[in-house]
Amino acid sequence: MLPQGDHNSLFVNEIPKWGEPYPNILNRQSVLECLTDYILQVNYRGYRPDPRKMLAVRQSDRTATLRNASAPIRQEVYYFIEGEIFPKEGTTRMKGGQSPSELAEELLVQHYERLYIWVAYDFTKGSPPGFRKPFDNPLIIKGSSCPNPGQVNRRQAPEGVNPRFFLPDPLTANIGDGGISPDVALDEIANFVTDLVKRDFRNALPEGDNPPIWDEPLIGVASATDPLFERFQDPEVVGPCHRFPEEWLPGARSVISVFLPFTGHISENYSRSQRYSAVEFSSGKWNGSKFLNVVRRALVRFAESHGASAVAPNIDPRYDSDGWLPFWSERHAALAAGLGTFGLHQNFISEKGAFGRLCSVVTTLNLKPTERHYTEVYGYCLYAFDGSCRACINRCPTGAITDARKIPGRCETHGNKEYLKDWNYGSCGHCSTWIPCSRGIPAKIRKTL
């Protein structure tokens, strides 16, 4: 399910191992000055917190400035002071005899580490190792009862499918909810994320007329004890590096997974014949990744507002990856959460297609798992279904996708990064555009569901 091969990447990881020097760390003094100025303003003639105010951080020097929320600017990230940096109401209210600078320093002592971790992950491209902070407890390694490290097909592939294409064993059924009364209804979570996508100014390209990047999301839930998480540790899946939900968060009960589909603005200038990706897509891929982190952090606050805890593994200081093998795979979490399956291109195919991205949180909220309407890892892939589709193979300009597998690393050799170097982007989207699964489950498969 995760292909093996060359683990080199064109993207350079700037994040140091936990405890090592960090040259590009968020400029602390600039944050202190911003908070001091903000606290001065909102405590003038009474206490009036300003929901418009945010910290804007430049990529070039990691310096923060204080601004009102507005259209995003290239190579910047943004954090609202009220409700995001400081979720608790009244945090920025000065106490008797306290100066703005004293309160700002007090708050920064408590929150600076968390802020610089946010900034580091928001400016990181690709999926490199994170801060690699050690876990508190020894890592748990289980794996499934029937691993298949040799990737030997245990059943016959459909006619038309290359016999060398690895067809994983069928998925286990969902764990029954046991008649649980969920702490929060799935609709409430979906409405929360949908409102964020529609209203937050950061869901926009920083170029042109600032069109939105993401459309309305899909939300799924997996039980934190679903046996699939054991299977994810098998060497032919992710591997023993993949951590269990309870390792990220003791007492974890659920995993919330979100699929965000790209809007039509991101693909409208991406023609079928062009070799390199459209600027709008490459911008949407990177700037959209920043917004995925906005969603992750918002879901953590959502869980906390309901008296629970939550962790977003992919922006946690303990996050790591072994080459292409992550400590937490968003695609596999989404597979467990009933959102969809893999494709030959190794993108994730949801009800809204493969043209989108994923994020997730692990939480102590007790939620009803989403039913999985599939039993195959490649259940929504037309090639794996009957061998009739080779669209992503034909779309790839580097030959990274074959009818047997995808070759990791090769897709980064097409020159896209060099072509878009003035924009400081580089992502390619050929294998998720102009194919039958771009915007939904292929019709031939949907008829069988």
Image: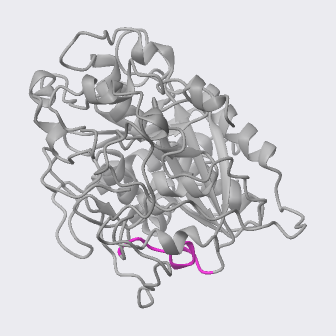
The quadrant holding residue 60 is top left
Nearer-the-camera pick, 109 or 428:
428
- Residue 365, position in %: x, y? 73, 66
- Residue 12, position in %: x, y? 14, 50
Q: Which residue does the image show at 21% across and 48% down from the upper left?
A: 408
Which quarter of the rendering shows the C terminus? top right
Residue 346 makes an appearance in the image: yes
Q: Which residue does the image show at 90% across and 67% down from the upper left?
A: 179
Nearer-the-camera pick, 165 or 49:
165
In screen coordinates, is 373 left or right of 348?
right
Nearer-the-camera pick, 417 or 299:
417
| In this view, 182 is above or below 200 | below
- Residue 390, position in %: x, y? 34, 28
Residue 78 makes an appearance in the image: no
Query: Magenta segment: does it hold 436?
Result: no
Which quarter of the rendering shows the N terminus? bottom left
The quadrant holding residue 238 is bottom left
Q: How many marks?
A: 0
In screen coordinates, is 182 left or right of 78?
right
Report the magenta residues as a range: 241-250
Characterize the magenta stretch by its predominant secondary structure.
loop
